[in-house]
Amino acid sequence: MATTTGLIMQGSQLGHALGPPVLALIVSSFGGWHAAPLALGSAAAAGTLLSLALAVLERQRERFV
């Protein structure tokens, strides 16, 4: 559990550092804010899936220890 929490916190901080410039790049590339909700939703979905995958891996690791 501690490993999963640590990785989630690191991912969160990485998102705080890289999110605004990446979103600005997306908005500039598409010429407006219409792509922003799709980009943010995709990032949120990816983060959720990664968190769930880490939780599953952590549970599997605990079974073998």
Image (spheres, helix red, strand yellow):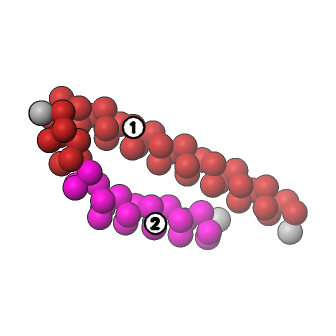
Whether 30 is among the magenta residues is no
23 versus 6 height, above or below: above
61 versus 23 height, above or below: below
What's drawn in magenta, residue-wise? 2-22
Neighbour class for label 1 at 10 Å: few (<14), some, many (≥20)?
Answer: few
Q: How far apart are marks 1 and 2 (CA)?
A: 19 Å
Q: What's under tag 1, amino acid-wise?
A: Ser
Q: What secondary structure is found at the residue carrying circle 2?
A: helix
Q: As rendered, which of 37 and 65 lies closer to the eye? A: 37
Quadrant where the image shows the N terminus: bottom right
Check the image and name the residue furthest to the right: 64
Check the image and name the residue furthest to the top: 34
Quadrant of residue 65 in the image?
bottom right
Q: What secondary structure is found at the residue carrying circle 1?
A: helix
Neighbour class for label 2 at 10 Å: few (<14), some, many (≥20)?
Answer: few
Q: Earlier in the sequence, mark 1 or mark 2?
A: 2
Q: What's under tag 2, amino acid-wise?
A: Met
1 versus 23 height, above or below: below
Whether 11 is among the magenta residues is yes
Residue picked out by circle 1: 42
Residue picked out by circle 2: 9
Left or right for 12, reference 52: left
